[in-house]
Image: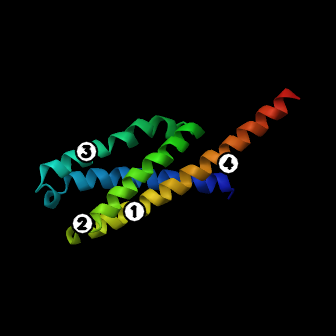
Amino acid sequence: MSKIKIARLATLISFFGLLALVIYWTLNPSQLKTSATSFVLLLGGLPLLFGLPGILKKKPYTHAWICMVSLLYMIHGVVGWNNEDTRFLASLEIFLSVLLYLGAGFYARYRSRELKALSANQTI
């Protein structure tokens, strides 16, 4: 399997895993104690949804952009890790956001190089 396919697979798994985690964490009855937390988590899923079309169309720019967005989720996971009740979900969020950062970053890098090489070959 090529490096670009591995990066793409890591991106897709972590992207949809993180999206599912945010939805679960928002709708989890034990987390609905504070509506402010649920509201923030619901809004937290919006950046992922904005990146969904570009991720599905394999656009390197969107992968680079979602790479930076994943850092917000990592920060949220680190803050949530401090609470004993949310430690497992926060650990999962940290893992998925780091995997998304790496996968999307490497995919953007490898795909940009591939597209640049293709365009260079066509101009010759």
The reply to whether residue 59 is visible in this rendering is: no
* Cα gap from disc 3 to disc 1, whole angstroms: 17 Å
The residue that label 3 is drawn on is 42
Residue 118, relative to residue 81: is it above or below? above
The residue lying at 23 percent from left, 68 percent from top is 83
Choose top left, top right, bottom left or bottom right for residue 82. Answer: bottom left
Mark pair 3, 2: CA separation = 16 Å
Residue 107: x and y in percent read 61, 49
Residue at disc 4, secondary structure = helix
Q: Do labels 4 and 2 touch, CB within 8 Å?
A: no
Q: Which residue is mark 2?
A: 86
Residue 54, percent from left and from top:
50, 36
Residue neighbourhood size for the residue with mark 3, other residues' Cα within 10 Å, grouped as few (<14), some (14–19), many (≥20): some
Of the residues shown, which amino acid type is indicated by label 4? Tyr
What's the image's color scheme?
rainbow
Separation (CA) of disc 4 from disc 1: 24 Å
| Label number found at residue 94 | 1
Question: Disc 3 on helix, strand or loop?
Answer: helix
| Nearer to me, 78 or 111 | 78
Q: To which residue does mark 4 refer?
A: 110
Residue type of the residue flagged with mark 2: Thr
Residue 39 drawn at (x, y percent): 20, 45
Please tell me which residue lies in front, 118 or 37: 37
Write down the quadrant of residue 111 in the picture.
Answer: top right
Disc with the residue nearer the chain's start (1 vs 2): 2
- Vertical placement of 13 versus 81: above or below? above
- In the image, taking residue 35 as reference, residue 67 lies left or right, namely right
The type of residue carrying mark 1 is Ile
Residue 56 - label: none
